[in-house]
Image (cartoon, coloured by chain):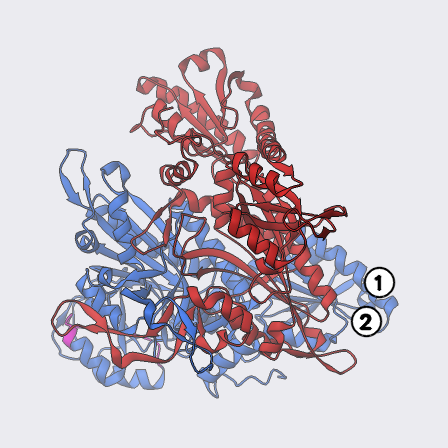
Chain colours: A blue, B red
Amino acid sequence: MAKNLTTRAEDYSKWYNELVIKADLAENSGVRGCMVIKPYGFAIWERMQAELDRMFKETGHQNAYFPLFIPKSYFSKEASHVDGFAKECAVVTHYRLKNAEDGSGVVVDEDAKLEEELIVRPTSETIIWDTYRKWVQSYRDLPLLINQWANVVRWEMRTRLFLRTTEFLWQEGHTAHATKKEALEEAEQMMHVYADFAENYMAVPVVKGTKTESERFAGALETYCIEALMQDGKALQAGTSHFLGQNFAKAFDVKFATKEGSQEYVWATSWGVSTRLMGALIMTHSDDNGLVLPPNLAPDQVVIVPIYRNDEQFDAVSEVAKKLMTELRAQGIRVKFDNRDTHKPGWKFNEYELKGVPVRIAIGPKDIEKGTVEIARRDTLQKEFISMEGVVEKVTSLMEEIQNNLFKKAINHRSEHTTEVNSYEEFKDMLKTKGGFLSAHWDGTAETEERIKNETKATIRCIPIDRKEEAGTCIFTGKPSVGRVLFAKAY
Amino acid sequence: MAKNLTTRAEDYSKWYNELVIKADLAENSGVRGCMVIKPYGFAIWERMQAELDRMFKETGHQNAYFPLFIPKSYFSKEASHVDGFAKECAVVTHYRLKNAEDGSGVVVDEDAKLEEELIVRPTSETIIWDTYRKWVQSYRDLPLLINQWANVVRWEMRTRLFLRTTEFLWQEGHTAHATKKEALEEAEQMMHVYADFAENYMAVPVVKGTKTESERFAGALETYCIEALMQDGKALQAGTSHFLGQNFAKAFDVKFATKEGSQEYVWATSWGVSTRLMGALIMTHSDDNGLVLPPNLAPDQVVIVPIYRNDEQFDAVSEVAKKLMTELRAQGIRVKFDNRDTHKPGWKFNEYELKGVPVRIAIGPKDIEKGTVEIARRDTLQKEFISMEGVVEKVTSLMEEIQNNLFKKAINHRSEHTTEVNSYEEFKDMLKTKGGFLSAHWDGTAETEERIKNETKATIRCIPIDRKEEAGTCIFTGKPSVGRVLFAKAY
């Protein structure tokens, strides 16, 4: 095709990078590891935000906003938390610049040094729990169900657009509960919410499960996750939900008076998804011609391209196109009519294929004569002429059909790339030849997990929540195991 | 009243601070000058965002996202810009912490010092124009109409919740145009958009105008603004829109090929409103009983409070309340039914008065008998019983009535506090006794402006765009003037 995209078969990683740039989703900025999310990419993220935000509110959560900066001392209060994040955080040390004495520009003003350094939040547990101490007095104040949409910074050494960037956008839920049971239910519920979103909006099938101890969030007692499989056979963690026990409540002294009058520490969860979801969306559906978007998240679900040779034809075609646009919009469909005279139809066809618009409609003078339009599907690249009267109905049903087809294709790909392996030889072989999820017995120790990781780069993605009990022996040590876990190389 | 609020007459400033805390809008955090926006405050901000975002999109703008950090060298490229912001910016100098050798916690790792310091954005012109250089090649790429919702940081020495905080939330529009005329029109258009939002959603009347040279944004050739008047007679700048000329295009070398093939620098605007609007909203309408919210921005427009003494009564009242809630929601009204059994009706009445819910409906067993409900308006504190059949119609019309009434009250207050003064004595007198906007002749020099400011603390808020030409003499120097400008003490 004319997109000049590297193909997936040639170099999957290069294909991804080129696609993100060429489809106008994002680009690298002048700041190391930080990206610019371009309007088209941001419009997709806004649709993700809108749906997730609705789902959070429907499950009783409210949004709030906490400071970008975290005093260094807060950070140290929860031991495993600081270990997990201290090595990758941006530190503010001064609050003023001044003119350089040699006139070479501005320099840091050493007279404006902070007494205590501030960390740019890598995640907000510490500043939020410091606040919750003031908000929680009694059982009447619980549960506290809060979400925040925010930017966070983790100083990553190797970055990739959307998948791993120094600054990224995300939401972080932070809840406080009276009982352990309630907090566990909340953490599990949010995993289901994330899975629902991934599957029904992103059309990305996910495995729900829990993380092994070594893969857990720094400070969590249990981490629930959703794991997706990309087209290159690598896994991508798409969302996590943590049961934090009473760790943060104890670190920040957050207690409540029970109905009976005693003082108890509250129970916590936190959960988040980020602009990383954009990477999952792109890599699950797109092809060598460019982006493929599921209708439920496409900023434009339908684009109408007029075909004409002169003003008269343009006017006639425009009239029909605008009428169709109005009818489609009345059905709640997001339609764009690209009537720019600066670009030819062929160029536009290419452009919208590259940008993954689910349905393209072309209308020319011959169509008007015959009372037809040409409809092209992005997912299958099929084209057909259909009569003008049937267009609205056809396009409406295509929205659902394309959404379902993308999900089905992704499910099939995952099935074909999920393999039960029963020996370490088979495991290594499969990892090399086919990749994907490898379902295998493991002895449950962090040591074995670590050794397999060092030797093969595969990690335990999760212990599926719906795994069946099955006695077996660990593929690495031969020790007994009670059920299979999912291994994969991961993003 | 029982809110224990300091009254406005006693101490306006204290009243404001207490109200923000007691109405659960925001609070100070453990980080100097940074606030926590609480769920109720954030819900109001979300409504503001939703309306503004819609207005921006309707005028052709798209959202995008640019990095939080700005390399120090970018900052220096536009001379007046760096002068304006260098003295109040947070500087990131390191990217890692490490464990202290004495075991006392974590310290900055001096081995992880950045080669070039990063500034936490106080505004994003520089990083955005560095990006626009890549986006703009030809006249076909223009206009570029971009907006960003973001957090920004300005190291303020004296902070107040919402009005002036170290970190605040805002939107910043950044547009690029082929001609000066177009850029000027854009800057002016956005002032009108802001005014429309302030008046029709916030019910806050504003004066549209331009800033004097000394009050302009650092880097702007013209700053359009909207100025509101608070109940204490002080002005509040509610939004600004800047015509930046070619300053940033030249600083960042952003040129485009014209239709004719020549290379020209593009013309720029930027415009923003922030969480400061929350301060304007609060201070314009609220009273000694608490917050007063205009229906167009109230998270809950109506609250229904059940009155009951036993379970049986509760069930009967609930049934009626839920039916009413469904009917009101069908009209698009945001209704909350507060059926908590942990708080008494009187406590709830107080609570919703404090939180400014526009309409409160109380339903008890006697109401059910009589087929009535009690409706209380927050703006006038009037109560009346009306028949159940008429409730939906009554409440629907109240939404508009309250919105209009708040705007009218604010307009009246502004009229009463806008005075034409014709001598410096009168000016100083009025400033001391009544405050408000003082409409006066000024000779047009920065020197006079500065001297009046130093002597009286009053600044020129704006040169109203609709001022009439009127020959006069400057109140301070007696030199000739072509029209009046608006002075006031300001937040």
Left or right: A435 as drawn, with respect to B133: left
How far from the left and from the top, in percent, is residue B144? 64, 68
Q: Earlier in the sequence, mark 1 or mark 2?
A: 2
Residue type marked 2:
Tyr
Q: Nearer the viewer, residue B278 or A369?
A: B278
Instruction: Tell me where the magenta segment starts and ends, as one range.
Output: A435-447
Residue type marked 1:
Ala
Q: Is residue A283 visible?
A: yes
Q: Is residue A479 above or below residue B337?
A: below
Identify the residue position indicated by label 2 in the image. A308
Q: CA distance from mark 1 to mark 2?
A: 9 Å
> Dot 1 falls on which chain?
A
Q: How many marks?
A: 2
Q: Residue A316 shows which numbered tag?
A: 1
Q: Is residue B307 above or below residue B459?
A: above
How far from the left and from the top, in percent, is residue B44? 47, 44
Q: Say what secondary structure mark 1 lies in.
A: helix
Q: Is residue B11 above or below residue B277?
A: above
In the rendered view of the protein, which quadrant contains the N terminus of chain B?
top left
The crowding category of the residue bearing disc 2, from other C-alpha atoms within 10 Å (few below 14, some 14 to 19, many at least 20), is: some
